[in-house]
């Protein structure tokens, strides 16, 4: 914009001085025929010419030297706007949200487990969990600050927009968190939830805003054949993707289901084109499935109309047969050995090859510190005696108690938007 302003000023200044010089020329009295008078008038005209033509150039060049980048700023403006989801021209550009520490904050949580949109499995307090400190930890990145979630501010940014969270049950976990963070400022008769097959949507009617969740844990298509065999189509996605068109903000996750094997696997065979594949390295299959998703985004979405964020995988603490998170009361302070999960490496590689600007929201390392935040045995409402007995119980170390860790993911999401 500065170049346009400077050029405009130069043109206006030039025209102003030229017009003024012409007026001055016309106002001159008849020439004196004496030699000295003639020379004086010629000098005056020469000085006027030099002043009125060179000074505007000097003025413009000086401005350019003050900020030499201004000359090119308008050229880059359009492409920078397109890429702002990826480059984040705000505090997130200067700060890596994935690096920091958990700090205890008594002002949290931002809602309680009585939020009517929570499923029983994540309402750990209502299910009898005796401690509540896991609700009060806030993530503090190194070198910057994530503001406390502002429900009205978020709804204001989302006015007349659709935001859709796409993925597995961990993404459903995050959707419930986001709905509970905003619903408290909306009158009861001005909010509702609708269902449409794999899609559910919370509507803030006065803001004309919908916060939606779409069930697609693998992103690509999983179909059951006539022989009841389950086929994972690594190169088909349209049955799911048709729901994503017209959405303003898309937030994806997909990782956990790709790591299932044996009896926990959700498919019997892979299929790519007309080829049926019985065995494949899970990370190779994951890369193929993500590449199908990436091609669809590149070909079908307009970065001027849609923002795309991919949240990295949420860590599980399932070692020791799923009891690694049982009775954990504090976050880990650090890792003795930092391990980058293979699905995150695959995801980073796919996103880097895309033309569409996708922002990778990396929550993996920060969340791996929170082994205290899982429901464990408190995913069902049971009395304390049965909890102590420990008979017939399973421990959920994959999902997250709410209020809890996903609230912080959503505080980060609000900053990114």
Image (tube, helix red, strand yellow):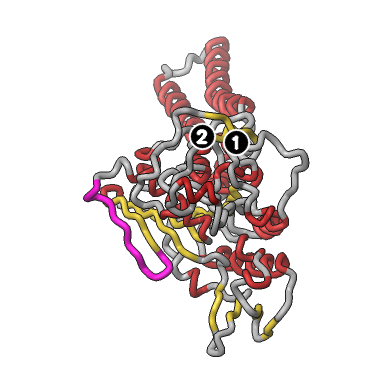
In the rendered image, the residue lying farthest to the right is 337
Instruction: For label 2, count other residues whose C-alpha is less than 10 Å away and answer few (under 14), some (14-19) or many (20+).
Output: some
Residue 174 vs 411, above or below: the answer is below
Q: Is residue 245 left or right of residue 274?
A: left
Q: Considering depth in this image, is 182 or 315 the residue closer to the camera?
A: 315
Residue 358 picture location, percent across and down? 58, 54
Foreground of the two, 24 or 283: 283
* Point 54% across, 79% down: residue: 223
- Label 2: state its secondary structure: helix
Indicate the quadrant where residue 289 lies: bottom right
Q: Which residue is mark 2?
A: 133
Is residue 280 or residue 56 the one in the foreground?
280
The residue furthest left is 189
Rendering coords of residue 342 (x, y %): 72, 56
x, y (%) of residue 409?
52, 44
Residue at the limit of the structure toward the bottom, as seen here:
227
- Residue span colored magenta: 188-199
Circles 1 and 2, Cβ within 8 Å, touching? The answer is yes
**Residue 288 visible in the shown view:** yes
Name the disc covering residue 256, or none. Answer: none
Residue 112, magenta (yes or no)? no
- Residue identified by numbered label 1: 330
**Is residue 269 shown left or right of residue 412?**
right
251 versus 110 height, above or below: below
Rendering coords of residue 140 (x, y %): 58, 32
Image point 51% across, 31% down: which residue? 10
Mark earlier in primary sequence (1, 2): 2
Task: Name the residue: 53% across, 47% down.
Answer: 388
């Amino acid at each position: 914009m500065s170049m346009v302003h400077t050029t405009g000023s130069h043109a206006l200044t030039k025209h102003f001085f030229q017009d003024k010089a012409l007026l001055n020329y016309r106002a001159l009295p008849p020439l004196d025929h004496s030699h000295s008078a003639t020379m004086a008038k010629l000098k005056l005209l020469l000085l006027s010419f030099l002043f009125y033509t060179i000074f505007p150039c000097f003025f413009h060049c000086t401005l350019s030297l003050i900020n030499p980048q201004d000359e090119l700023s308008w050229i880059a403006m359009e492409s920078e706007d397109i890429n702002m989801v990826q480059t984040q021209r705000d505090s997130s550009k200067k700060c890596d949200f994935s690096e920091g520490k958990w700090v205890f904050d008594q002002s949290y949580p931002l809602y309680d487990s009585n939020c009517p949109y929570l499923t029983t499995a994540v309402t750990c307090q209502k299910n009898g969990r005796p401690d509540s400190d896991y609700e009060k930890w806030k993530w503090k990145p190194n070198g910057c600050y994530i503001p406390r979630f502002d429900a009205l501010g978020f709804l204001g940014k989302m006015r007349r927009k659709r935001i859709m969270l796409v993925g597995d049950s961990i993404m459903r976990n995050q959707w419930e968190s986001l709905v509970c963070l905003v619903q408290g400022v909306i009158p009861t008769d001005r909010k509702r939830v609708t269902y449409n097959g794999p899609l559910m949507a919370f509507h803030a009617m006065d803001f004309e805003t919908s916060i939606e969740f779409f069930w697609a844990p693998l992103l690509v298509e999983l179909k059951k054949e006539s022989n009841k065999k389950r086929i994972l189509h690594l190169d088909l996605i349209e049955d799911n993707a048709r729901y994503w068109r017209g959405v303003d903000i898309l937030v994806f996750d997909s990782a956990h289901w790709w790591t299932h094997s044996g009896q926990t696997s959700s498919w019997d065979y892979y299929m790519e084109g007309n080829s049926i594949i019985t065995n494949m390295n899970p990370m190779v299959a994951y890369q193929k499935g993500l590449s199908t998703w990436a091609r669809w985004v590149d070909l079908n979405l307009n970065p001027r109309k849609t923002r795309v964020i991919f949240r990295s995988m949420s860590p599980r603490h399932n070692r020791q047969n799923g009891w690694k998170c049982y009775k954990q009361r504090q976050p880990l302070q650090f890792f003795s050995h930092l391990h980058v999960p293979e699905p995150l490496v695959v995801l980073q590689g796919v996103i880097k090859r895309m033309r569409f600007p996708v922002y990778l929201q990396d929550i993996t390392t920060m969340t791996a510190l929170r082994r205290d935040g899982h429901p464990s045995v408190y995913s069902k409402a049971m009395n304390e005696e049965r909890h102590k007995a420990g008979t017939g119980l399973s421990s959920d170390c994959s999902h997250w108690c709410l209020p809890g860790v996903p609230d912080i993911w959503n505080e980060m999401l609000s900053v990114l938007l």
